Image (cartoon, helix red, strand yellow):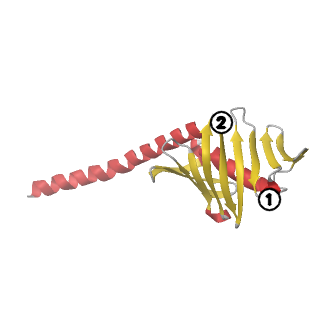
Amino acid sequence: MKIFRRIAALLLVLLVSVVPVSCAKKGDALKSEAAKQLSRGFECTAAVTWNGSSYQVKLARPSSGVCTMSFIKPAELSALSFELGKDGLKVKFGQLEASIDPTSLPQTALFNTILGALDEAASPTGVHAAAAANGGYRITGKTQAGSFTLMLGPDFKPRSLAFSGLNLSADFKDFKFS
């Protein structure tokens, strides 16, 4: 009987010491694969809720690296778009275009926050944790705007993004990697 207890204790010690390492390896592999997929170009539509206001936007980041966000709804903002490239941030409203300070309009903060989270998730060092969840993956990380949770599908396409401290959430639709 004593031998069985000793074997059981030994197995328990081995199991406890191996499980965290294998889980860490899985998390690191998920971080790496998520970063690989999310660093690609993409386009999508997102339903965004921020401080009680709802927006529908089109987001795009082609492989060239110039990011754009165009408002679809509300109708009053449908002529408003942002473009972020090597030359800084440009705001466009209809035919008008201007380079601006990225913090000067609330909507630019929305644009920078969403893209900042996707950029952080595209860098394995920007991700705090990655784990399988709800038939896909949960990525948590932090940007200058705060901590975020990014839910990905099994194909690593973003499903949703939440910044609980900012009262900001986005549900992604029609997400396509380019």
Q: Residue furthest top?
A: 64
Q: Residue furthest left?
A: 1
Q: Position of residue 114 (x, y in %)?
A: 68, 51
Q: Look at 64% across and 64% down and name the residue there.
A: 165
In this figure, which residue is indicated by the disc labeled 2?
41
Badge 1 or badge 2: first in the primary sequence: 2
Q: Do the residues under discs 1 and 2 have CB atoms within 8 angstroms?
A: no
Which of these two is toward me, 129 or 82?
82
In this figure, which residue is indicated by the disc labeled 1?
106
The quarter of the picture where residue 37 lies is top right
Q: Amino acid at mark 1?
A: Pro
**Secondary structure beneath disc 1?**
helix
The answer to whether 80 appears left or right of 14 in the picture is right
Q: Position of residue 175 (x, y in %)?
A: 61, 43
Q: Look at 11% across and 54% down and name the residue there.
A: 3
Q: Residue furthest bottom?
A: 52
Q: Position of residue 6 (x, y in %)?
A: 16, 55
Relative to 42, is 15 above or below? below
Neighbour tally class for label 1: few under 14, some 14-19, many 20 plus, Cα within 10 Å: few
Q: Which mark is residue 45?
A: none
Instruction: Quarter of the image for the C terminus: give it.
Output: top right
Measure the alpha-carbon separation of dots 1 and 2: 25 Å
The answer to whether 50 appears left or right of 18 in the picture is right
Q: Amino acid at mark 2?
A: Gly
Q: Look at 43% across and 43% down and name the residue there.
A: 25
Q: Look at 68% across and 32% down and name the residue there.
A: 63
Which of these two is toward me, 108 or 19?
108
**Secondary structure beneath disc 2?**
loop
Neighbour tally class for label 2: few under 14, some 14-19, many 20 plus, Cα within 10 Å: some
Relative to 46, is 175 above or below? above
Q: Position of residue 82 (x, y in %)?
A: 80, 46
